[in-house]
Image: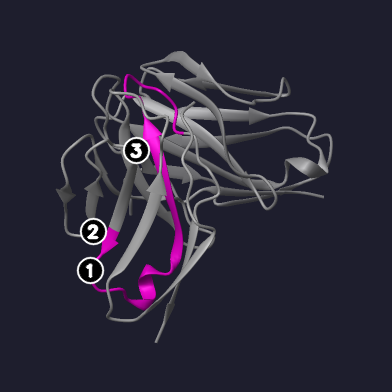
Amino acid sequence: DAKTTQPNSMESNEEEPVHLPCNHSTISGTDYIHWYRQLPSQGPEYVIHGLTSNVNNRMASLAIAEDRKSSTLILHRATLRDAAVYYCILDRGYGNKLVFGAGTILRVKS
Amino acid sequence: DSGVTQTPKHLITATGQRVTLRCSPRSGDLSVYWYQQSLDQGLQFLIQYYNGEERAKGNILERFSAQQFPDLHSELNLSSLELGDSALYFCASSAKPGRSYGYTFGSGTRLTVV
């Protein structure tokens, strides 16, 4: 399984943008980059995913490096409800399992 | 509500017992995945089913088994329970193999073995 590397924790101020980095230097050409987040005692929640191009949805934006060896999840205006563990995961598709790492704990200060 | 339903939400049972956890996938999703999350291990993949057939296996103990039924709901059976089996068990579903789809997780079953 291809591995991702994320910082253990990050802190942000409320109402400010947050950039969560992820390194995936062993990514293969068919791996999709997925981001999920998990609040305490809740199931992981899908945030966004992409293959090569940058992606935007109502929750966040995903910026993918040209060589695809890294990506950044962008929360445009952090709120207290965004405090969670954020997981960056590679998915081969075709029903392959998602392998979760330790993720990044995001703390948001008011 | 994510669309993935897990029951029961909480379960307390004694060592040596057997329990069954149930998962109903989101409407239209054919794949079901089971994950275990304990305090010191993070989210661990257990097993995946696609349209009734086992597709992939992770670090699932021999005491654990699962199946997916024709109506696509899935059950995870845990037997000869030990204290260390206490954890949150999550079910996730996705549409089908092929291009990558987002995975939808349920809210989990918290199992406490006493």
Q: Are marks 2 and 1 in contact (CB under 8 Å)?
A: yes
B68 vs B64, left or right, is left
Residue hosting label 2: A60
Q: Can residue A99 be seen in the rendering of this structure? A: yes
Q: Earlier in the sequence, mark 3 or mark 2?
A: 2
Structural distance between the alpha carbons of marks 3 and 2: 20 Å
* Numbered mark located on residue B111 in the image: none
Residue B48 is situated, as x and y percent measured from the top left of the image, at: 47, 23
Q: Earlier in the sequence, mark 1 or mark 3?
A: 3
In depth, the one of A2 and B52 nearer the eye is: A2
B44 vs B51, left or right, is right
* Numbered mark located on residue A69 in the image: 3
Residue A37 is situated, as x and y percent measured from the top left of the image, at: 41, 55
* Above/below status of A2 relative to B90: above
Residue hosting label 1: A76
When asked about the image quadrant of residue B16, the answer is: top right
Magenta region, residue range? A74-98
Structural distance between the alpha carbons of marks 1 and 3: 23 Å
Structural distance between the alpha carbons of marks 2 and 1: 7 Å
Mark 3 Cα-neighbour bin, 10 Å: few <14, some 14–19, many ≥20? some
